[in-house]
Amino acid sequence: MNRKLAVAEPFLTERHRKMIRETAEKKGFEVRIMDSPEEDRNFLNEAEVIFGQAPETAKVSTALKWICTPFAGVDKFLAEDAFANPEAMLSNSSGAYGVTIAEHTVMMLLDILRRQPEYRQIVAAHEWRRDLLVRSIKGSRITLLGTGDIGQETAVRLRAFSPACLTGVNQSGKNPGGCFDRILTREQWETVLPETDVLLMSLPGTKETFHMVGEKQLSLLPDGAVIINVGRGTVIDQEKLIRELKAGRLYAGLDVFEKEPLTKDDPVWELPNLLITPHTAGNMTLMHTVDRITEMFLADLERYCRGEKPDHLVDRKKGY
């Protein structure tokens, strides 16, 4: 019986699908490529390797030995009963999204500082106004929660705007790539909040990061501070943030929320000082991202076939 490899990812182009098929077949796999898991459940349940977001299959398949999700987040694979085969490996595509999310973060920050949401309303009303006071990244004190691929790519881009300081926050206390002016650990990070003009978040959703930014942390930020979250919505206590936004004390740009999608009647849509994007920062609509995801999977497939573990292996207990 041939070893089976299933690909269930609709964003892949024919070029990417061909690359995966040719590489996997050379390794002796029977390959089935589909746009969604529903196309061929039987093949999925028999697959040794799956490239795609298929948590339902992982939960029932005893044949599965490795699943690679094309996303960075692995929330759907962290429950105790997430894998029918407890020895199955989980890898993600963290490291592929830095460019697109960093650019999205800079876009949101400039949009807020340059008052573009208000100016779009002014232009929509066919008015000619030029009097809104704007702010600059230059001279801003910026704190980044998360110094992984996304945090580093964001720091590199922000450096060109001459901020006063780029402070990174992580668990190790190390300065990856030398991208930051200083690094604080999770035990120290709250001390920098009163000196933070811009708080950027690109953290995974874990037990340790749940509501890491809550009422206390929000209260420590100076008036007019900007918060941007492109990681996981659970990192912020959304109820407490809403209260600050209603009071007009803070500004925020949110690409992620505690519950998604937002319903049409959710009052969050109408919040003042809030810029919303519908979880598009890390979408696979940028071809560079799709290229990187495919390259990373194929490199890990080579390792897997040599009997090695994938480079992007996830520790399911830690959640990343």
Image: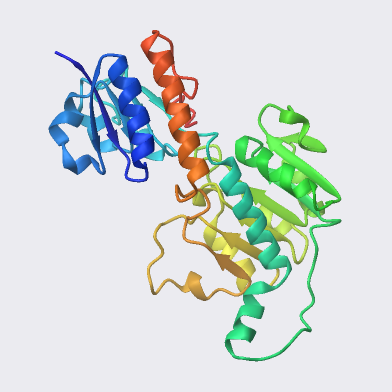
Left or right relative to 285: residue 48: left
The colouring scheme, among rainbow, by chain, secondary structure or one colour, is: rainbow
Residue 31 visible, this angle: yes
Given residues 167 and 189, the one toward you in this image is: 167
Residue 256: x percent and y percent?
A: 50, 55
Given residues 159 and 197, the one toward you in this image is: 159
Left or right relative to 10: residue 195: right
Residue 214 visible, this angle: no
In the rendered image, the quadrant that contains the N terminus is top left
Q: Residue at x 47, y 55 (%)?
A: 279
- Residue 189 in the image: above or below residue 319: below
Given residues 292 and 262, the one toward you in this image is: 292
Residue 122: x percent and y percent?
A: 64, 85
Q: Residue at x 68, y 26 (%)?
A: 172
Q: Residue at x 35, y 28 (%)?
A: 20
- Residue 19 in the image: above or below residue 145: above
Given residues 3 and 237, the one toward you in this image is: 3
Left or right relative to 309: residue 272: right
Left or right relative to 285: residue 112: right
Which quarter of the figure has residue 83? top left
Which quarter of the figure has residue 171? top right
Residue 108: x percent and y percent?
A: 63, 60
Which quarter of the figure has residue 274? bottom right
Q: Residue at x 23, y 33 (%)?
A: 57
